[in-house]
Amino acid sequence: MAEKHFPQRGILLYNPAAGPSDLTGKLHRIRESLAARGVDLVDLPTTHAGHAGQLIAEHRAAGSLDLVVTCGGDGTINEAAVALAGSGIPLAIFPAGTANVLARELSIPRTLSAAAEVLLGGFCVDVSLGKAGDRFFLMMAGFGLDAMVMHHCHPLLKRRFGRMAIAARCAEEFVRFTVPRMLVRAEDFASEATLVVAANIRLYGGDFVIAPDADPTDDMLDLVLFKGSSRLDYAKYAAGVMGGRHQQFHDVEVRRVRSATIHSLGDQPVPGQIDGDTVLETPVHLSVQKAAVRIFVPPNSPYANFSSRQRGARVAEQS
């Protein structure tokens, strides 16, 4: 359970090239509104991958950081969360990405002005980070077809056309990809699979529920193992995930673990993606760092409902 936190000064990280064309102007107006209500933010535009983490590290070293606000997609949010892990400095999310999966999971409003209100009337919740090899993830790590799709999806097309670009890339990859074979081992089981998703949250690819029991505030990962080897199997999986029926299939297995390893059973390693970025390959060890980063969530978030879930703490009363 998080303690009460009253942010006073912080940094606002954003990519000027991402989001709507008037993003900079909107953020300027939001920053002025927050300043009038006691939350002072310094604008820090990012210019390249990894820049958000660098900026956070610099301000943490200076010892004058109460709050980090990140405006961007899931990749930028991942960067910020990893840079803040273990610090106790809370992270606020202004969604401005392609799918905004984490914001959807946490019920953070999609409009920037509404997301800003979470700073003043929300809760601060301790969220776990998954770890794949030496890389951390907030949402999921995927091995197999989904990583191949993300690897070949051009960032410019992804930014411009959003999930439509990813769907088109998925259809193209579906026609030509070779189904990999992997062995997944944990303390109490060993199982083969052709697609593995290690989920820290329920949602996947937008608002599709891939792991209904996943909880980003516990110390577990939900492994969703797809075992089919034909294109027909994969078409069935896609329809099943979209309809919330995939866990009923005989060739889909779900396991809750604290750690696991994934090895390729073929001649080549299998690519992996974390939070939408393809950055690793098998063999890989999966684990969880519990309560690694504090994130602001609104009162209507399922993770802020302390009366039924006993987690979170009210940050401030709406003035």
Image (cartoon, rainbow, N blue to C red):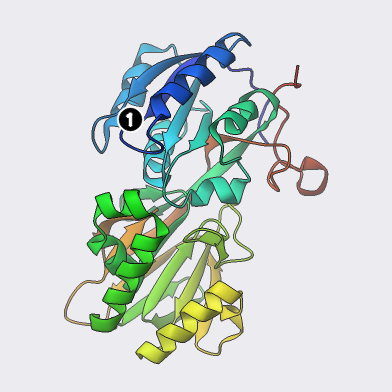
Of all residues shown, which one is farthest toward the front?
A: 21
**Quadrant of the image occupied by residue 227:** bottom left
The residue shown at (61%, 55%) is 215
**Quadrant of the image occupied by residue 279:** bottom left
Horizontally, residue 10 falls left or right of residue 218, namely: left
The residue shown at (45%, 64%) is 198
- The x, y position of residue 217, in whole percent, is 60, 48
Horizontally, residue 35 falls left or right of residue 132, namely: right
In the rendered image, the vertical position of residue 108 relative to residue 316, given as above or below: below
Residue for badge 1: 16
The residue shown at (49%, 72%) is 224
For badge 1, the amino acid type reads Pro
**Quadrant of the image occupied by residue 260:** bottom left
Q: Secondary structure at mark 1?
A: loop
- The x, y position of residue 61, in whole percent, is 35, 17
From the viewer's side, name the closer residue of 184 and 103.
Answer: 103
In the rendered image, the vertical position of residue 168 relative to residue 233, given as above or below: above
- The x, y position of residue 285, in whole percent, is 35, 61
Of all residues shown, which one is farthest toward the left?
A: 267
From the viewer's side, name the closer residue of 113 and 179.
Answer: 113
